[in-house]
Amino acid sequence: MSLNLTGITLTYPDGDSRLTALDDVTLDVPRGSLTAVAGPSGSGKSSLLAVAATLITPDSGTVTVDGTVTTGLSRGELTDLRRRKIGIVFQQPNLLPSLTAAEQLQVMARIDGRSPAKARGRAMDLLDAVGLAPQAGRRPHQLSGGQRQRVNIARALMNEPTVLLVDEPTSALDHERGAAVIALLARLTYQRATATVLVTHDATHLTAVDRIAEVHDGRLGARVVSPPGLRPARSPVR
Ligand SMILES: Nc1ncnc2c1ncn2[C@@H]1O[C@H](COP(=O)(O)OP(=O)(O)OP(=O)(O)O)[C@@H](O)[C@H]1O
Ligand SMILES: [Mg+2]
């Protein structure tokens, strides 16, 4: 199962008329694969992510998340679907200042009704996966920008999402740290078998992705970019 967008058109009110942000967009992202969505500012990247996250309902088209067609679901059903199936990483790590790295993750599990012991175990496992086990007890102001973004990514994985949606995770980072975050996302995508969409306008460190979907004026074109040799080793999809 995967993330599937079919024939998505999205318009926003624009004075007396409407602005077409997404124009008949179709995109299929299988589990265990990483699709980058690249394109100039204002081309519709964040709108695409918001539709995939079921945060915005498109004018037409269908969003299917792990086999569930989201059309016609109530607000409560969508909230539940997001909590169980979708991890979202926003551009700025919106971490809570008073919580340690481990606690940022555990809060997510508490919302989901997991036992505190299980939540702590999973939080430590994920912090280890993003290379931050030694920093588990630190609060956001005691972490670097790149470390904060890694906590953000680990937190999005806390409820074992099928779909991982990431908007410009490297924009506040220098090139080297940005590349490390992309490589980490690629590894987690394969290890945890998520259908991952990564929005970026920076095409320089996209060698680790499976494909780049370019968006221009709300229209999507897909092409395969990475030669197989450049891809990180793929772990068995569970
Ligand atoms: N809430 C809104 N109301 C009206 N127009 C909007 C709204 N959000 C976005 N737009 C318009 O829709 C188009 C696509 O915006 P979007 O935020 O998806 O672009 P983007 O590719 O993410 O850009 P950036 O790289 O700058 O983040 C733009 O023309 C933008 O002005
Ligand atoms: Mg954007």
Image (cartoon, grey):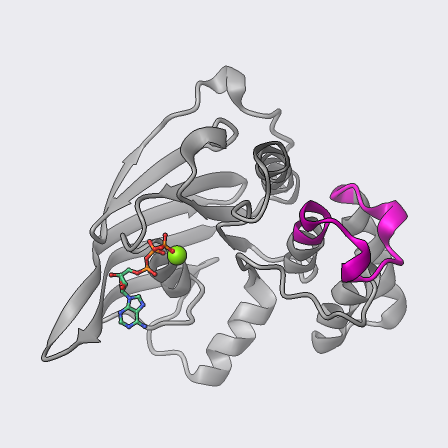
As for residue 114 lying within the magenta part, the answer is no
Foreground of the two, 164 or 6: 164
In the rendered image, the vertical position of residue 167 relative to residue 234, given as above or below: below
* Horizontal relation, residue 139 to residue 238: left or right: right
Q: Residue 181: horizontal and vertical position, in percent?
A: 62, 40
Q: Quadrant of residue 113?
A: bottom right
Identity of the residue drawn at 27% across and 56% down: 6
In the rendered image, the vertical position of residue 99 relative to residue 129, given as above or below: below
- Range shown magenta: 129-149
Q: Residue 178: horizontal and vertical position, in percent?
A: 58, 38
As for residue 138 lying within the magenta part, the answer is yes
Q: Residue 197: horizontal and vertical position, in percent?
A: 46, 48
- Can you name the residue that lies furthest to the top here? 229
Identity of the residue drawn at 46% across and 50% down: 2
Quick check: which quadrant has ligand 1? bottom left
* Horizontal relation, residue 63 to residue 138: left or right: left
In the rendered image, the vertical position of residue 153 relative to residue 51, given as above or below: above
Identity of the residue drawn at 59% across and 43% down: 173
Identity of the residue drawn at 30% across and 56% down: 44
